[in-house]
Amino acid sequence: VNEGILKADISLLEKQNSKPVTGGYKKGDETTISSEPGCTYYIYSITKYGSSGSIGMVTLSKSAPVVLPEMHDGRIKEYENKSILIGDYDFYVRKVFDNGKDIAANIKVTKNTALIEDLELKKGDYIWMGENLYQIENIAAAFRDKVKDPNGNYEWNPGYITFKVVQEYLPNR
């Protein structure tokens, strides 16, 4: 991730036994994979789901991708027992809890109901969700209001997690 743009290293061989040409490609870039006619493609999507160690995927296409509008504030706030759906992937915030050191969140990542990854995340951790890398900005456990509502009751508020889009990230190599 560089200046908020997700990039992928793709190695291309100019000739069969040549040294690879490697570059940081972003969505919408063109790449030619052979000197044969018709071998120019667009980087249609770059996606990665789950933890930093998960494997990403690059999709090539003959047609240019549709670029989605940017998020308004670069944040997603999701509550306990709710899901974030991105493509075929479901990021279910199962629970927010105190793990003894921090407030943490258990997130189950599934694709078409099959479990992909079971994560325990705390503030500052990273998670890939499709074309964006997010950092956990805040996690709050469930709590009761300190002031009564108009009916004289203390309202119960569910736990939540706030994800913030990462603008710059260079992983350790």
Image: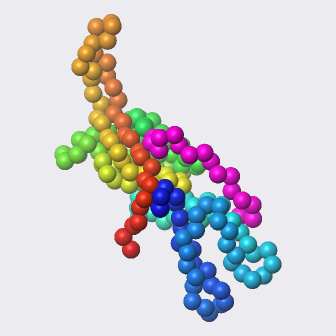
Residue span colored magenta: 61-76
116 vs 9, nearest the viewer? 9
Residue 107 placed where, x, y %?
A: 39, 46
Identify the residue at image location x=61%, y=61%: 27
Identify the residue at image location x=45%, y=49%: 165
Residue 140 placed where, x, y %?
A: 30, 36
> Is 142 located above or below residue 61 in the figure?
above
For the stretch drawn in magenta, what is the main secondary structure?
loop
Identify the residue at image location x=52%, y=40%: 72
Residue 56 placed where, x, y %?
A: 52, 64
Residue 68 placed where, x, y %?
A: 62, 48
Q: Is residue 64 rendered magenta in the image?
A: yes
Side of 123 relative to 60 (left or right): left
Residue at the far bottom in the pictured view: 17
Side of 58 relative to 125 (left or right): right
Q: Is residue 89 rendered magenta in the image?
A: no
Q: Quadrant of residue 158?
A: top left
62 vs 48, nearest the viewer? 62
Residue at the far right in the pictured view: 37
> Is 40 located above or below residue 154 in the figure?
below
Residue at the far top in the pictured view: 151
Of the 4 image quadrants, the one containing the C terminus is: bottom left
Side of 171 relative to 104 (left or right): right
Is residue 13 among what the camera can see? yes
